Image (cartoon, grey):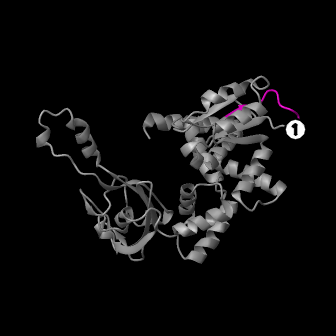
């Protein structure tokens, strides 16, 4: 985040805190997140503890007078427009053009609803790859309403899939917490990890089935990482190039002597990485775009059948960078499987492991 981006984000934090009547000092982001969690706690105290996060979402949307509709195809969209015709609710006329492939959701404040109808309507894009984000998209719209407080600032609002504006970044951060509300998620996580012994893909699926059936496997896994007390990395790996190799490839077509510049070969590299808090104390860093060892279980999984889980132990010292060598020393346990031309892996750092000196 650049200085200008950080300044813009801090400005948004202060604006949101002011709308909610929160102090403009200390850790403002944490104060806002705490406020939103407390709001959920009030609704739960008034209506009872839901068993699942889906039930919690239904409770919250009812408390906010928000109606949520999912659109999976043109049939769903046309049915929604018949039920709420633009002639009655003019904002609906924008749906066909605004709910495109660059949009996760739209929300509008209805101007002509019946007494029994909710005044806010969120339409969630569930077409194609957007369907994987539908649970998070719902919580994103919920957080927008919570942050508006009593100062509602929209009649029609579009939520883009690429969220770079400071307000959208803040809403995403809060939604990531509320979507896996600790009061419901953490007890289920603790039960399953105690039963399994450690974080695993099967354990994540068990937690998801119990309390977060609408959430994606990916989002549930990241939530589990946030609650995990053991040192573990999550890695998504893909075939790709180093940054300087990408530049070389971009320049290759313009060079006068292409034969003197042999093309680099793509390798299996870290595309995305996340970790539990316990990792931070060990000084071991798996970083983005790092090459995956050819001998690793992660590389084996790429060559295996899609969805088949591979498990095994290996030496951390085989994980190396071209500039500094091994990232650490000791034994690690790896669990990995391939999916859609990439590999997902959980890397457990065993006792006695140490970082690079």
**Left or right, residue 325 beside residue 218:** left
Q: Measuring 43% from the left and 66% from the top, which residue is drawn there?
A: 336
Tell me if mark 1 has few (under 14), some (14-19) or many (20+) residues whose alpha carbon lies within 10 angstroms of its own: few
Q: Tell me how many marks there are.
A: 1
Residue 321 pos. (x, y %): 27, 59
Which of the 4 quarters of the picture holds residue 192? Answer: bottom right
The answer to whether residue 111 is magenta is yes
Q: Is residue 176 above or below residue 221?
A: above
Which of the 4 quarters of the picture holds residue 127? Answer: top right
In the image shown, does 69 or 151 lie closer to the viewer? 69
Residue 137 pos. (x, y %): 62, 44
Q: Measuring 64% from the left and 42% from the top, which residue is drawn there?
A: 72
- Helix, strand or loop under label 1: loop
Q: In this view, does 229 lie above or below 61?
A: below
Quadrant, the N terminus: top left
Label 1, on which residue?
116
The answer to whether residue 328 is magenta is no
Residue 196 pos. (x, y %): 56, 75
List the single residue furthest toward the front. Answer: 75
Magenta part, dominant SS: loop
Which of the 4 quarters of the picture holds residue 172? Answer: top right
- The range drawn in magenta is 107-115
**Left or right, residue 92 beside residue 206:** right
Residue 356 pos. (x, y %): 31, 66
Quadrant, the C terminus: bottom left
List the single residue furthest toward the right. Answer: 115
**Left or right, residue 156 beside residue 268:** right
In the image shown, does 65 or 42 lie closer to the viewer? 65
């Amino acid at each position: 985040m650049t200085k200008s981006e950080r300044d813009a984000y801090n400005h948004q934090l202060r604006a949101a805190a002011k709308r909610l009547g929160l102090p403009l000092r200390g850790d403002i982001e944490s104060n806002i997140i705490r406020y939103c969690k407390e709001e959920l706690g009030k609704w739960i105290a008034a209506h009872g503890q839901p068993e699942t996060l889906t039930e919690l979402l239904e409770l919250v949307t009812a408390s906010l007078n928000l109606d949520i509709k999912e659109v999976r195809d043109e049939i769903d969209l046309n049915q929604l427009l018949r039920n709420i015709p633009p002639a009655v609710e003019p904002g609906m006329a924008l749906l066909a053009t605004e709910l495109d492939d660059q949009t996760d959701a739209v929300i509008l404040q209805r101007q002509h609803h019946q007494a029994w109808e909710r005044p806010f309507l969120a339409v969630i894009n569930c077409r194609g790859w957007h369907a994987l984000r539908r649970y998070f998209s719902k919580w994103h719209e919920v957080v927008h309403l919570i942050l508006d407080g009593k100062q509602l600032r929209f009649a029609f609002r579009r939520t883009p899939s690429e969220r770079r504006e400071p307000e959208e970044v803040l809403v995403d951060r809060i939604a990531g917490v509320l979507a896996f509300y600790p009061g419901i998620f953490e007890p289920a996580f603790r039960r399953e990890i105690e039963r399994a012994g450690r974080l695993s893909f099967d354990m994540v699926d068990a937690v998801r089935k119990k309390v977060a059936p609408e959430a994606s496997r990916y989002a549930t896994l990241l939530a589990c990482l946030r609650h995990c007390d053991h040192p573990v990395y999550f890695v998504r790996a893909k075939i790709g190039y180093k940054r300087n190799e990408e530049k070389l490839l971009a320049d290759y077509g313009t060079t006068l002597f292409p034969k003197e510049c042999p093309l680099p070969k793509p390798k299996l590299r870290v595309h995305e990485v996340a970790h539990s808090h316990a990792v931070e104390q060990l000084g071991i860093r798996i970083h983005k775009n790092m090459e995956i060892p050819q001998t690793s279980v992660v590389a084996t999984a790429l060559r295996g059948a899609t969805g088949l889980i591979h498990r095994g132990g290996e030496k951390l010292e085989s994980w190396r960078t071209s500039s500094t060598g091994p990232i650490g020393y000791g034994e690690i346990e790896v669990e990995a499987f391939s999916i859609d031309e990439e590999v997902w892996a959980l890397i457990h750092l065993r006792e006695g492991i140490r970082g690079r000196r």
